[in-house]
Amino acid sequence: MVKTINERIDPGTVPGLARGRHAGAPAVRACTGPQPAAAPPAPPALAAHGVSLSFGGTAVLSDVDLEFPTGSITALVGPTGCGKTTFLRSLNRMNDRVPGFHRTGTLTLFGDDLYAPSADPLVVRRRVGMLFQRPNPFPLSIHENVVAGVKAHRLAPRSKLREITESRLREVGLWDAVADRLGTSPFRLSGGQQQLLCLARALAVEPDVLLLDEPTSSLDPVSTEAVEHLLSTLAPAITIVVVTHNLAQARRLSDRTAFFFDGRLAESGETAQVFEQPVSDATRRYVTGRFG
Ligand SMILES: Nc1ncnc2c1ncn2[C@@H]1O[C@H](COP(=O)(O)OP(=O)(O)OP(=O)(O)O)[C@@H](O)[C@H]1O
Ligand SMILES: [Mg+2]
């Protein structure tokens, strides 16, 4: 049976879709006797199998196999132009309308084909949220920005919207700075504050996965630390994939690291292993700062 992505799946209610770093751990059994057959392992939040991506016939990445375990934080690293953004955007179908874009291979969300004909791209993007390198608030008020997705997807009644705005702005640490100007334009906020606002907007639709493309590259060290801390608290409830050129950040923040190089996934694994005992020579040279 072809599974589809046309409605939200609550991992708390669907067997095999439990969230969290330890979601795959076997339950403690309280009784002895005949045991039921072991449940199949829960699928990872996201997975790529044999994925190749190209623009206008020019290959960007070929034959990528990569899994993102539920509840984990994965860093995508590699030299500029190696395809990190293209790959990230393919994980929530943001490349669909880019002229010349072509994908082969399979990308799944909790085992469901992200590109199945019946998968609704709008639902995919709600479940797999994205934060871009440059903050992109909508030309709406601060309040309307936070609840834009909530309203579009009709996730809450109007009476709840103000509450949602406050709780999400508190979550990202922006409430105190903007509480008295919720009706004003976000473009008067600093770059870091705008990025936090976009994060609040992304979180308001309660995504299962958050994709972040160099989210702190335009932020000062204090805002960077705040965003990193926030991301570390969002996992394991939310599976996180973050592109970064900041190798120290990848090391601090991620459980797993994937290194793209020369049109391929050169290496992936536990972050400590990738940085301390890389298998590929290219990875070793990259993580020791010899290029990139
Ligand atoms: N819309 C597009 N049309 C054509 N080619 C594109 C498009 N977007 C990206 N590319 C090409 O795909 C390749 C990978 O680009 P991508 O932006 O994914 O790299 P990246 O690893 O994110 O780089 P950086 O670290 O500089 O952000 C580049 O050669 C780029 O020119
Ligand atoms: Mg990029």
Image (spheres, rainbow, N blue to C red):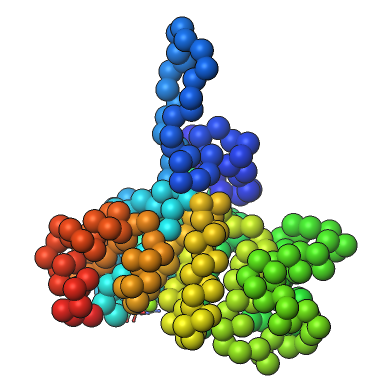
Question: In this image, 182 relative to 139: left or right?
Answer: right
Residue at the right extreme?
Answer: 159
Q: Nearer the viewer, residue 267 or 111?
A: 267
Please tell me whether residue 24 is drawn above or below residue 257 in the rendered image. Answer: above
Q: Quadrant of residue 194?
A: bottom right
Total number of numbered discs in the rendering:
0
Residue at image x 16%, y 67%? 284
Q: Is residue 45 visible?
A: no
Residue at image x 43%, y 34%? 25
Q: Which corner quadrant of the figure contains ligand 2?
A: bottom left
Quadrant position of the C terminus in the picture: bottom left
Residue at the top extreme?
Answer: 33
Q: Is residue 290 visible?
A: yes
Residue at image x 38%, y 66%? 252
Question: In this image, 154 relative to 129: left or right?
Answer: right
The spot of residue 224 in percent (x, y) is: 49, 78
Please tell me whether residue 164 is drawn above or below residue 289 in the rendered image. Answer: above
Question: In this image, 190 relative to 287: left or right?
Answer: right
The spot of residue 269 in percent (x, y) is: 28, 54
The spot of residue 83 in percent (x, y) is: 32, 72
Q: Nearer the viewer, residue 126 or 60?
A: 126
Q: Quadrant of residue 273?
A: bottom left
Residue at image x 75%, y 69%? 165
Residue at the bottom extreme?
Answer: 188
The spot of residue 168 in percent (x, y) is: 69, 66
Please tell me whether residue 199 is drawn above or below residue 115 in the rendered image. Answer: below
